């Protein structure tokens, strides 16, 4: 009798959830996972017969299932606390920091990165002052008993493989404390030593004289992926007279300021820095006392870094090769005697398919 009651109760709960899913409006976005959720698939003879309908319907039901975030949290807690797994879907937590497993080193993709950057150099950057640097991800600072990339091998491969570029090693200018708890990026207000190192090697002036602006709470990209959340961070952006008076031109949309403050508190507050991912951004220093210009080939870390280099240049052009094929560069940039900084995260180098050829 007891087993029958438990079975009926369980079936009742399942059917209740099923009917609630029918009447509750579908969600467009998952703010915790930072992605669009699946929509109900279109019903057609071809979709049904090919099996596409059922595949898409499965994704739809998984995405739109009521209480989905709660179930994800229970699953993650079960993985960590009951089964004693060190990670949940490659996400793990240590000392309040949320990490994502990146292992092993993909030498093929590292070589792909080298070839793509050398192609850019050979086509556009010869006879220019070209520097490159690699930004270590948070996993770099984990103890050696954790699975992580062979960073030394990656750095050696890239530094020996790139043509005629001066390497700027910034690894000794960073610690784990310089990164957000739940995000992949470093904090703008903690990278003064990185900027000092770059300025020293590239011979431009840098004065660490900024006003801090803080926003709390900030939850990074790993917060939602972990399913169990974590501690909130404070996101800080820095301003001075140069940054406040800079003119910003975005070739993908209308962008007026270095910091898009309206992004704070939305799906990705990190978009406060130059409004997030975009193929090409040009920042003009209206207060400049030099005519030097800088071109930065970068990923999302560059959005944080570039404003702090502006005092040393009349104009900075940021190029994101994830969104702009290199054969289109001369449509927007006149390559002449600019300084060039090629700076990418170790994560992107190990996943270089994201860079367009």
Image (tube, grey):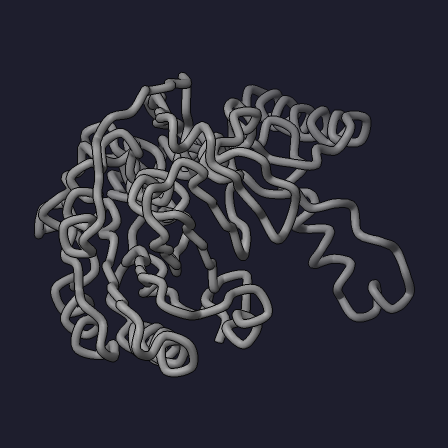
**Which of the 4 image quadrants contains residue 349?**
bottom left
Q: Quadrant of the N terminus?
A: top right
* Left or right of 49 on screen, residue 5: left
- Which sits in the foreground, 194 or 105? 194
Residue in the picture at 32% in, 58% down: 344
**In the displayed structure, would residue 86 be above or below residue 41?**
above
Across and down, in percent, residue 219 comes to: 42, 28
Residue 67's x, y, as percent?
60, 26
Residue 339, horizontal then vertical, whole percent: 31, 61
Q: Would you identify the image quadrant in which residue 150 lies?
A: bottom left
Outermost residue on the right side: it is 45
Q: Which residue is painted at 19% across and 29% down in the image?
A: 95
Q: Position of residue 59 (x, y in %)?
A: 65, 50
Foreground residue among 184 and 123: 123
Residue depicted at x 40% and y 54%:
299
Residue sitting at x 34%, y 23%: 233
Does any portion of residue 307 appear in the rendered image?
A: yes
Q: Is residue 346 above or below residue 286?
A: below
């Amino acid at each position: 009798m007891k087993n029958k009651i438990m079975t009926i109760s369980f079936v009742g709960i399942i059917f209740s959830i099923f009917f609630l899913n029918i009447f509750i409006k579908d969600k467009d976005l998952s703010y915790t996972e930072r992605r669009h959720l699946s929509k109900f698939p279109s019903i057609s003879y071809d979709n049904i017969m090919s099996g596409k309908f059922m595949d898409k319907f499965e994704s739809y039901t998984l995405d739109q299932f009521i209480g989905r975030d709660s179930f994800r949290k229970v699953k993650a807690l079960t993985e960590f606390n009951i089964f004693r797994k060190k990670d949940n879907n490659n996400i793990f937590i240590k000392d309040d920091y949320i990490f994502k497993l990146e292992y092993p080193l993909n030498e093929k993709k590292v070589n792909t990165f080298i070839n793509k950057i050398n192609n850019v150099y050979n086509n556009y950057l010869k006879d220019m002052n070209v520097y490159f640097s690699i930004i270590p991800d948070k996993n770099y600072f984990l103890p050696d008993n954790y699975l992580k990339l062979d960073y030394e091998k990656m750095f050696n491969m890239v530094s020996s493989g790139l043509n005629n570029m001066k390497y700027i090693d910034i690894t000794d200018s960073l610690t784990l404390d310089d990164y957000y708890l739940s995000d992949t990026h470093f904090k703008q207000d903690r990278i003064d030593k990185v900027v000092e190192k770059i300025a020293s090697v590239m011979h431009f002036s840098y004065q660490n004289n900024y006003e801090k602006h803080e926003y709390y709470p900030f939850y990074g990209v790993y917060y939602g992926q972990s399913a169990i959340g974590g501690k909130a961070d404070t996101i800080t952006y820095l301003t001075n007279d140069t940054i406040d008076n800079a003119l910003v031109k975005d070739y993908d949309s209308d962008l007026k300021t270095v910091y898009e403050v309206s992004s704070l508190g939305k799906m990705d507050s990190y978009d406060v820095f130059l409004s997030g991912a975009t193929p090409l951004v040009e920042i003009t220093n209206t207060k400049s006392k030099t005519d030097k210009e800088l071109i930065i080939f970068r990923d999302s870390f560059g959005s944080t870094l570039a404003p702090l280099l502006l005092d040393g240049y009349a104009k900075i052009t940021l190029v994101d090769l994830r969104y702009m094929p290199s054969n289109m560069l001369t449509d927007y940039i006149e390559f002449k005697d600019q300084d060039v900084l090629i700076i990418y995260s170790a994560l992107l180098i190990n996943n270089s398919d994201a860079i367009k050829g």
